[in-house]
Amino acid sequence: MAKILAIAEHRNGKLTDASLELCKAAKALASALGAEPAAAVMGKDDSVAKEVAKYIPTVFSVTGAALEGYTADGYSQAIKAVVDAQDVKGVLIAHSYDGVDYAAKVALNIGAGIVSNCNKARVEGGAVVFTRNTYNGKIQEEKKVNTDKFVATFEKGAFDMEAAGGAGAVTAVAATIGEVRTKSKGIIETMAGAVDISQAKIIVSGGRGCKDADKYKDVIVSLAQKLGGEYAASRPVVDSGWTDAARQVGQSGKTVAPDLYLAAGISGAIQHVAGMKGSKCIVAINKDPEAPIFNIATYGIVGDLFEVIPAMKEKL
């Protein structure tokens, strides 16, 4: 039976949320296409593959010294080995820094058409129709591939995360990894206390309406801590030096899809919205009732953030 293959990413031995979303996507597309959902995991051993087996029934593990750290050459060759050994119709990859790096190489290696940065997918007439943003998120377009196989990268939040509860089978796939032109020497934390906000369940984000660095810290950072979440910012805040670039949300920053995204003093420019529109619940606070952010907000509060947020904190 043909397979829809989700590529599971992991960091420091832990699966990313995007990988769990891809497991859900593989199951949905496989069901609609009459195929079988599966996942592939690359690494130095099969420990992460065993974890993935809790979320999807079939897992292919490709291991070896050349796969201990991420490289585009190593991953693309490993994925080709899985595709060659199995009847794979589609490969699903997270639209992450790594995924963007190797997805096109995978498509070239297996002779597949590719659609990147997708936020939806459906099956129509036996073919997958992918929806993706274009023109900085101002337009959504639908794409199909005209090849037998396809590769697609998906934004975080395109699908819900798959829940654990299964006991899938892990199968080792032999792969001869040829030339690897780059070598990972490890991950360096460039900022003390740096976090990956794309994994946060609650995000409090501030914009230029916070006025200055001290006020941003007093209202945004403190509320995030009170809620047990992470704080983030729009590009003007980062450009002003109020917080570091690792916390920027938007077209030129991180794409996030938390359970709760609270946007305070953010107008809702399309570049920012492109990075957070997949959030399950969006709460917007802005003095301007015509601010574009209210067009996508689940709940909107027209008011001064310096009055609204202290009142919220009193209730927590």
Image (cartoon, helix red, strand yellow):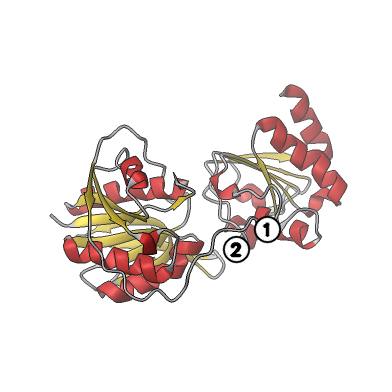
Does residue 303 show up? no
In front of the other: 191 or 264: 191
Q: Position of residue 168 (x, y in %)?
A: 24, 40
Tell me the residue at 26%/75% (across/down): 111
In front of the other: 126 or 15: 15
Kind of residue at disc 2: Gln
Does residue 44 show up? yes
State the CA–CA distance, disc 1 to disc 2. 21 Å
Tell me the SS state at disc 2. loop
Q: Are marks 1 and 2 in contact (CB under 8 Å)?
A: no
Question: Which mark is on residue 190?
Answer: 1
Which part of the image, by quadrant, shows the C terminus? Answer: top right
Question: Which mark is on residue 251?
Answer: 2
Kind of residue at disc 1: Thr
Q: Position of residue 284 (x, y in %)?
A: 67, 43
Question: What is the tally of numbered marks visible in this picture?
Answer: 2
Outermost left residue? 1
Tell me the residue at 75%/52% (across/down): 207
**As drawn, is 83 to the left or to the right of 248?**
left
Q: Determine whether 248 is above or below 258 in the image.
A: below
Q: Where is residue 66 in the image (x, y as percent from the top left)?
A: 38, 64
